[in-house]
Image (cartoon, rainbow, N blue to C red):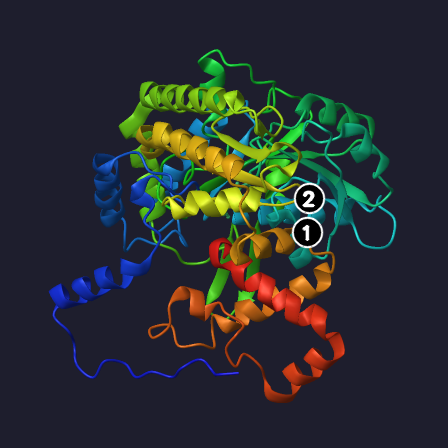
């Protein structure tokens, strides 16, 4: 395996203009999200808003969120943002929260707070403490649980892709410390039945965390517009905490989320103080240490640039666009939408797998679309953003053309499509996991500049630490080789 290439610092300073040109050039091979043909990752309104984000960020670039006493302005901005999030999500006077760097941090903090509370309460029996989640919840819960030594018990979702409440209840044991659910799920945009999950939380005296990273700053406006949205926020009395991302439908810049708690008694579990460091007393309310004030400033700027009317207007546009897309998809006899999505994220698939979804995806990609392939079950994901709206008609007409072409001329399974399909269905998941881990390593072992992203993520290269690879190949034989080959295709779009 090649080591991470060593490099020297530039011997001399470069002119600022050159540096900026070089940085801009580095982006040339990146996904072109501005095309409106990529359906995730970038939450964009327009250039004027982006410009405001840049200017607001600049104002607080050097200020440090580490010490809110030194930068009182940042604490004030944070308090205002937490207050507005709490107001929007129907918190009360006791509701409180902390600004964080993203959904991942918010969720890790929540799980940490509940774990600390459970450890103190000492009513949970011996062995690993457990959280119960629907299978559809974001994998960051698994990651957080892994970091915090918690066990995740996953309940299957029902036929409508909502959490199966009975299945969740069945998983509750003496060691369960928390229930969690989504508003909505990322893959299918489905709102879990929060009131029903609340009822089992009450019955078993358990807290309930709602992951509204995706929907926290969109669902409230969707509801105000009159779309049906079942109660999911602090109006459900059993909900004890909510994570919601400013950097998604809050339209701030990346690195902005909030974790809200029903009250301070819960939140104080996530605070940390060290009193005997030679550097003095160290206190921290969240996970991160030093970080720029820019993310706070940009979130504050976004809220004030849009105001209620702006968020409502964007929500209206997105919901109307989404409704149009859904209507059009529903007229296509080969296509079905998974469940009943509650906002502007959804997934669709082909009925009975005809035509093959991965062939369809590839044909769409040949027409310049980037498709988010999902599995369990196979589907295509879309999160609609304002910059997608002008492209919906072309998307549908391309989809129709592709379906027609596949009907007239049943496609042969191209190599790519076959591999996507197999990667989704491959049964030996532990091998898949091992290969993905190797792919992560390869990001640090192959020269970035020379190779295309695709080559960087490839396993075809001399990936291996000599003997190890050969030994593994020998042991796992054809399975390993198959997994490597499959992931080569699968990963290109996913990582
Ligand atoms: C529902 C949900 N939860 C959690 C996360 C993780 O958030 P982040 O990527 O900001 O850490 C995401 C990200 O897409 C999400 O959609």
Mark on residue 437? none
The secondary element bearing badge 2 is classed as helix
Horizontal side of 61 relative to 463 (left or right) equals: left
> Which residue shows up at 71% across the image and 31% down it?
163
Image position of 362 with respect to 419: above or below: above
Q: Nearer the viewer, residue 275 or 56?
A: 56
User: Are the residues flagged by discs 2 and 1 in contact, CB closer than 8 Å?
Assistant: no
Q: Quadrant of residue 436?
A: bottom right
Up-down: is 223 above or below 15?
A: above
Residue 50 image offset from top left, x and y in percent: 25, 40
> Nearer the observer, disc 2 or disc 1?
1
Q: Is residue 58 above or below residue 276?
A: above
Q: Residues within 10 Å of mark 2 (few under 14, many from 20)?
A: many
Question: Could you tell me if residue 149 is visible in this image?
Answer: yes
Query: According to the image, label 1 marks what residue?
Result: 425
Earlier residue among tags 2 and 1: 2
For the residue pair 159 and 426, the one nearer the viewer reads as: 426
- Which residue shows up at 48% across the image and 83% down it? 2
Work out whether residue 18 or residue 85 is closer to the camera in this orientation and state it: 18
Residue 114 image label: 2
Q: Which residue is more in the foreground, 397 or 321? A: 397
**Is the C-beta of the residue carrying label 1 under 8 Å from the nearest atom of ligand 1?**
no
Can residue 72 be seen from the camera position used here? no
Tag 1 secondary structure: helix
């Amino acid at each position: 395996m090649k080591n991470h290439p060593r490099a020297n610092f530039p011997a001399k300073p470069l002119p600022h203009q050159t540096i900026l040109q070089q940085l801009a050039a580095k982006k040339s091979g990146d996904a072109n999200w501005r095309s409106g043909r990529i359906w995730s990752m970038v939450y964009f309104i327009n250039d004027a808003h982006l410009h405001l984000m840049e200017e607001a960020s600049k104002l607080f670039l050097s200020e440090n969120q580490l010490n809110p006493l030194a930068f009182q302005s940042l604490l004030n901005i944070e308090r205002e943002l937490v207050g507005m999030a709490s107001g929007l999500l129907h918190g009360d006077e006791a509701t409180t929260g902390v600004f964080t760097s993203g959904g991942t941090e918010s969720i890790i903090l929540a799980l940490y707070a509940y774990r600390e509370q459970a450890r103190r309460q000492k009513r949970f029996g011996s062995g690993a403490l457990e959280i119960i989640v629907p299978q559809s919840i974001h994998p960051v819960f698994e990651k957080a649980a892994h970091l915090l030594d918690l066990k995740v018990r996953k309940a299957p979702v029902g036929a409508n892709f909502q959490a199966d409440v009975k299945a969740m209840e069945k998983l509750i044991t003496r060691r369960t410390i928390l229930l969690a659910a989504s508003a909505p799920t990322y893959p299918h945009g489905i709102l879990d039945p929060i009131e029903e999950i609340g009822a089992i939380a009450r019955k078993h005296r358990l807290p309930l965390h709602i992951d509204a990273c995706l929907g926290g700053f969109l669902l409230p406006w969707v509801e105000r517009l009159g779309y049906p949205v079942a109660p999911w926020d602090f109006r459900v009395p059993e909900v004890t905490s909510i994570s919601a991302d400013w950097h998604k439908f809050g339209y701030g810049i990346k690195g902005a989320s909030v974790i809200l708690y029903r009250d301070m008694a819960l939140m104080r579990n996530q605070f940390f103080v060290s009193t005997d460091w030679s550097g003095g007393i160290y206190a921290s309310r969240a996970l991160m240490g030093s970080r720029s004030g820019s993310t706070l400033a940009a979130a504050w700027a976004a809220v004030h640039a849009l105001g209620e009317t702006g968020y409502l207007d964007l929500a209206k546009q997105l919901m109307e666009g989404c409704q149009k897309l859904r209507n059009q998809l529903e007229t296509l006899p080969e296509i079905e939408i998974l469940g009943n999505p509650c906002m502007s994220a959804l997934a669709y698939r082909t009925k009975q797998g005809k035509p093959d979804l991965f062939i369809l995806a590839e044909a769409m990609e040949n027409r310049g679309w980037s498709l988010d392939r999902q599995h369990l079950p196979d589907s295509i994901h879309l999160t609609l953003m304002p910059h997608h709206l002008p492209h919906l008609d072309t998307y549908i007409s391309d989809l129709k053309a592709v379906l027609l072409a596949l009907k007239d001329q049943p496609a042969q399974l191209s190599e790519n499509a076959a591999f996507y399909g197999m990667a989704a269905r491959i049964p030996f998941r532990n091998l898949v996991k091992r290969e993905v881990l190797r792919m992560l390593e390869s990001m640090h072992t192959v020269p970035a500049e020379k190779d295309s992203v695709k080559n960087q993520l490839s396993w075809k290269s001399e990936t291996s630490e000599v003997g190890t690879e050969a030994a593994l190949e020998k042991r796992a034989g054809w399975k390993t080789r198959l997994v490597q080959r499959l992931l080569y295709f699968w990963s290109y779009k996913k990582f």
